[in-house]
């Protein structure tokens, strides 16, 4: 996605990042940001890049208060390194996005990255309590927890989530943490239709089962469902027993727990499917739309892809689709139809990566701008009036 860049900087501190952005502002340079590089294909290509600012050296723990269940980190720290810091205190950031060893906290915030545990713990907008940013002119600003200077009138931490580096450099972030669970247990049910996935999700809610994650995986037209319970041992065992007590017409006869030493690595299965293919999609729809999503969106895409992998998080209405194009024109038509169906249901279809240049040119990665687009334009004008931060990468070419 990146064109040739003559100027690459790698600040070793937030103060250094402030100085470098202030200097680029004086030059009128257009700047883009890179963390671990795991989501460079997400969004449009920037209209121009003069300076590439890498955050890999911004990797310090700034403040950690285990008793308060909060931590403040620089944005270049990887998710894996952050979790390793928390593990000795039996705590964690309740985020399980893919490629934890490479994905940086700043990058995850900028792309609103998430994994299946979002079903229980919410998104990064629910986990972040404070943020520090460097604006296009080199001004350092803070919002939320651990405040030094607020940007009045904005919920700055939430505003930065999903902003794709178009409003400022995410320099630091403060998160609320969760205790690490005493016990975890996955259960698997194989060979289910989309209607049966939806029925099972409905049954989980009705029986008040609190799954931390529900994943439906398919590389055909049938799904295997993986359900995670975690917490204190007796609670995990109790919930597993309740799951297996569901009526047979809902549960089927093949539900089984997965051993800890397991024949199935669910996290690896989820990550591999989400990262598969030369064209990858992220779809969000209301959870109740699941059956129609499978019939009217996923089925045509399966035909248009030469090899198609699908991951659903059915309790939150998220789907990830990836594969290789069988025929570019057929896939383009299927993508256009899929987006129309998804948007008519109040959902959103985004291209998170496309290694097919012709399709990238002809199919917008975001689709129809949302009703909030005028507000987004005003925010871009307020934070980056000269359009020097990732211009054109965001929705509607912001």
Image (spheres, rainbow, N blue to C red):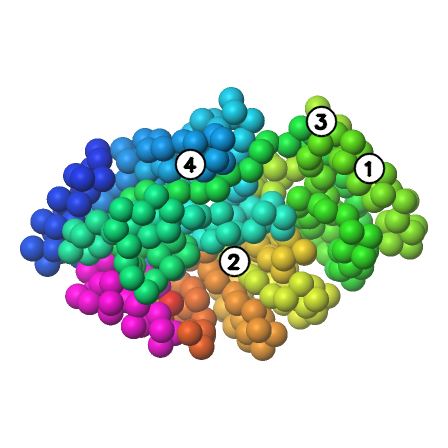
Q: Based on the displayed image, in which of its 4 quarters is residue 61 positioned?
A: top left
Q: Is residue 259 left or right of residue 347?
A: right
Mark 1 highlights which residue?
238
Q: Identify the mark nearer the N-term, 2 or 4.
A: 4
Q: CA distance from mark 1 to mark 4?
A: 32 Å
Mark 4 highlights which residue?
71
Q: CA distance from mark 3 to mark 2?
A: 31 Å
Nearest to the eye among marks 2 and 4: give it: 4
Q: Identify the mark nearer the N-term, 1 or 4.
A: 4
Residue at 40% over, 63% down? 360
Q: CA distance from mark 4 to mark 3?
A: 29 Å
Q: Please, what secondary structure does the residue beneath circle 1 have?
A: helix
Residue at 77% over, 48% down? 209
Q: CA distance from mark 3 to mark 1?
A: 17 Å
In-front residue for pair 292/232:
232
The answer to whether any part of residue 141 appears in the image is yes
Mark 2 highlights which residue?
281
In-front residue for pair 397/78:
78
Residue range highlighted in magenta: 373-394
């Amino acid at each position: 996605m990146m064109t040739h860049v003559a100027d690459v900087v790698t600040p070793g501190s937030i103060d250094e990042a402030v100085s470098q952005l202030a200097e680029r502002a004086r030059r009128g340079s257009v700047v883009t940001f890179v963390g671990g590089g795991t989501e460079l294909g997400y969004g449009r290509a920037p209209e121009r890049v003069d300076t590439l600012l890498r955050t890999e050296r911004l990797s310090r723990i700034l403040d950690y208060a285990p008793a308060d269940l909060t931590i403040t980190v620089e944005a270049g720290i990887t998710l894996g390194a952050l979790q390793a810091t928390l593990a000795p205190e039996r705590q964690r950031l309740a985020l399980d996005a893919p490629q934890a060893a490479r994905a940086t906290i700043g990058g995850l915030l900028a792309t609103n990255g998430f994994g299946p545990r979002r079903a229980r713990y919410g998104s990064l907008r629910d986990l972040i309590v404070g943020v520090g940013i460097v604006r296009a002119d080199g001004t350092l600003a803070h919002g939320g927890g651990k405040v030094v200077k607020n940007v009045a009138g904005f919920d700055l931490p939430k505003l930065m989530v999903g902003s794709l580096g178009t409003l400022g450099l995410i320099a630091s972030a403060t998160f609320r943490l969760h205790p690490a669970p005493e016990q975890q247990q996955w259960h698997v049910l194989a060979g289910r239709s989309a209607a049966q996935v939806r029925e099972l999700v409905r049954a989980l809610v009705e029986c008040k089962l609190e799954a931390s994650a529900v994943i439906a995986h398919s590389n055909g037209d049938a799904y295997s469902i993986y359900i995670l319970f975690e917490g204190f041992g007796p609670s995990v065992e109790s919930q597993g027993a309740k799951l297996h007590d569901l009526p047979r017409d809902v549960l089927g006869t093949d539900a089984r727990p997965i051993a800890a030493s397991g024949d199935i690595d669910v996290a690896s299965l989820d990550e591999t499917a989400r990262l598969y293919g030369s064209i990858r999609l992220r779809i969000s729809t209301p959870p109740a739309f699941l059956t129609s999503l499978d019939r009217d969106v996923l089925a045509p895409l399966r035909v248009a892809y030469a090899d198609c992998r699908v991951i659903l998080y059915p309790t939150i209405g998220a789907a990830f689709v990836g594969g290789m194009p069988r025929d570019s024109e057929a896939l383009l038509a299927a993508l256009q139809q899929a987006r129309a169906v998804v948007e008519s249901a109040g959902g959103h279809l985004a291209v998170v990566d496309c290694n097919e240049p012709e399709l990238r040119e002809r199919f917008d990665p975001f689709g129809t701008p949302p009703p909030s687009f005028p507000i987004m334009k005003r925010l871009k004008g307020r934070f980056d009036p000269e359009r020097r931060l990732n211009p054109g990468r965001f929705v509607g070419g912001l």
